[in-house]
Amino acid sequence: MTSEQPAFGKPIPASRVREADWRRRPDRGFWHRPEWMDLVSNILILVASVMFGVAAFKLVVKLPLFALREVVVVSPLGHVTSAQLRYVVDSSMRGNFFTVDLDSARKSFENLPWVRSAQLRRLWPGAIEVTLEEQVAVAYWRNVESGDTRLVNSFGELFDAAANDSMPVFSGPPEAGPVLLAQMRRFNTLLEPIHRKIVTLTLSGRHAWELKLDDGMVIELGKDLSRDREGRKVDATPEERLQRFVALWPEASQKIGRPVVVADMRYQSGFAIRMADSAQRKGKQ
């Protein structure tokens, strides 16, 4: 063991020197850092306060004071019945003013046959306001293969509901609802000079158009092959073929003098007709 020699007196062992240095060194542990201890205590107090606040809130919102007292439907309704509304309210609106699940209730309202969309909001102190957008049916949709019938709304969307109104009938690919609706409006506008309307509009799997008028006549317009691959105009569009029919029909109907079952407008420079006796005639422009 080594010793250190002081200027005066006896030598001091090295071990005692190191022990004295350690005791003089400031302690760096957690319990000797007041600022750390204050920080941790503040965090613990904050966490405890938040947990207490959440527990208190959950307790308060369950009090009878916040019971759900009424559900107010502010939209005028034409197809949705009061019985359907009561069923949705009783089955989906559980809880009080704060705990009722509005998203779940909204989905329940939208599952009603004639409801397109629903919006719900809380009205203090104990009411729920419901705004419903009803479906507006504009046509029937008939599946040629299965024979099933659905309804088409004013956006061209298909929905399931019962109806017995007099409306046009669409037939075609299910995803083509908006296309058929827009095309029916264009075709009906073109038919106005001869005072006819469409009762059945068909878009085949090959994208050929066929329409049946309110007098029973079927007009075959075919596919839209008006442009080639380079975009050049090579043929008439279905709208142009219908315009040609409307222009020629008043004079042609007087000359024929008999009911026409089918008018085939797929010819470039003329058309063909089939009358009730199945005889076929061709007309030229």
Image (tube, rainbow, N blue to C red):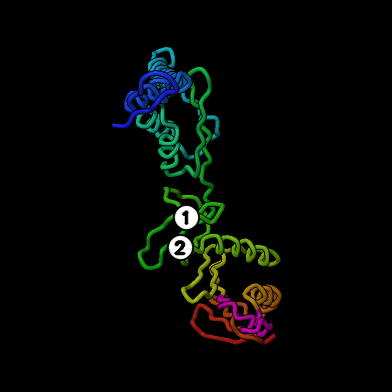
Q: Which residue: 56% across, 78% down?
A: 223
Residue 42 in the image: x percent, y percent?
46, 19
User: Quick check: can you spot residue 172?
Assistant: yes
Estimate the x, y position of residue 48 in percent, counting from the top left: 40, 19
Q: Amino acid at mark 1?
A: Leu
Task: Please name the residue that numbered disc 1 is placed on.
Answer: 158
Quarter of the view holding residue 227: bottom right
Q: Main secondary structure of the magenta part?
A: loop
What's the CA distance linking mark 1 and mark 2? Answer: 8 Å
Q: Which residue is mark 2?
A: 174
N-terminal of the pair, mark 1 or mark 2, is: 1
Quarter placement of the N terminus: top left
- Taking the image as drawn, is residue 40 in sight? no
Which residue occupies 53% across, 19% down?
124
Q: Residues within 10 Å of mark 2 (few under 14, many from 20)?
A: some
Does residue 266 show up magenta in the picture?
Answer: no
| Residues at discs 1 and 2 in contact (Cβ within 8 Å) | yes
Location of residue 167 with respect to 51 vertically, above or below: below
Read off the magenta span.
220-236
Query: In the rendered image, which quarter is residue 12 located in?
Result: top left
Foreground pick, 237 / 49: 49
Q: Which mark is residue 88?
A: none
Most foreground residue, 80 or 38: 38
